[in-house]
Amino acid sequence: MPLIPKSHPRAKSLLIREKLVDGFDRGLVAKEGLLAQGRGEAFDYLLGEKTGKAATYAIKVAAAQLLLAKQPVISVNGNIAALCPKQIVKLSKQVKAKLEVNLFYTNEKRKQAIIKTLKKNGANEILGSKILSSRKLPGIDSARRIVDKDGIFVADVVVVPLEDGDRTIALRNVGKIVITFDLNPLSRTSQTANITIVDNVTRAIDLLINESKKLSKMNQKNLQKIINDFDNKNNLKESIIQIKNNLTRRSKIA
Ligand code: PTJ
């Protein structure tokens, strides 16, 4: 009998958790990545475990931004490699973005395991592992400061899914446009990115792939208009209101 029966009321959430645990056992995820998942789950619960209006809007803007980018890069950490390796490779192909492994809890063995997983899922080139290509991102002290000279270092748009706070600010300070997936609308990353998708990356990634496909037929002027009309701070407020409304509704039926 499976440990998590399909009939379990929280089967979906528990299966996502299993992906992380399995990723940990396969050497992809840092111990701290398991804790990060727990924090995300708590916010997902408060959001009603569904993609809200604000996230749907941010996904559309992110797609437009990725399609307009000249040198987009998707940064991959342990949690992303465990949760959605196939989709992250698919997105990189859809929007012609490079993939770069960039770890907070840096560890060569884990980096190589992540590269192997991405390759197994269809990636051709993965940046971030060659010492000779490494450069330092100013204004950040963690291992995330080490970036690839052909990737994040020269990128105009960087996707940093599921991230700790420091790097987004450092990337913004050197003029990069930052897109993130973060279930916590209050986190520093959420608050400082240009485009924050407040949703579970496991739900939002497919939506972003589909939206990128849809918008790929749109001209540059219209794509730019989608970006210009967007205000990240306002959109984050919508996600906070989504949480508030959920809590209000639940407080009435509790
Ligand atoms: O693999 P490494 O070494 O690069 O480390 C990766 C982690 C995730 C451990 C590292 O970046 C970290 O410590 O991140 P934080 O500071 O815990 O931040 C992670 C953010 O992602 C938090 O705001 C969580 O709420 C959010 N989060 C967690 N799971 C998900 C998520 N957001 C979207 N989808 C999720 N599944």
Image (cartoon, rainbow, N blue to C red):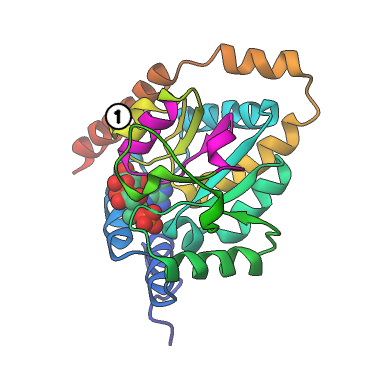
**Where's residue 134, x and y in %?**
50, 48
Residue 190 figure quarter: top left
Report whether 160 appears left or right of 89. Answer: left
Residue nearer the viewer, 115 or 150: 150
Magenta residue span: 149-172
**Where's residue 174, x and y in %?**
45, 25
Q: Is residue 182 magenta?
A: no
Residue 193 figure quarter: top left
Q: Residue at x 24, y 39 (%)?
A: 250
Residue nearer the viewer, 24 or 126: 126
Quarter of the image that includes the C terminus: top left
Quarter of the image that includes the N terminus: bottom left
Circle 1: is it few (<14), some (14-19), or many (20+) Cα within 10 Å? some
**What is the number of callouts on the image?**
1
Residue hosting label 1: 245
Q: Is residue 81 visible?
A: yes
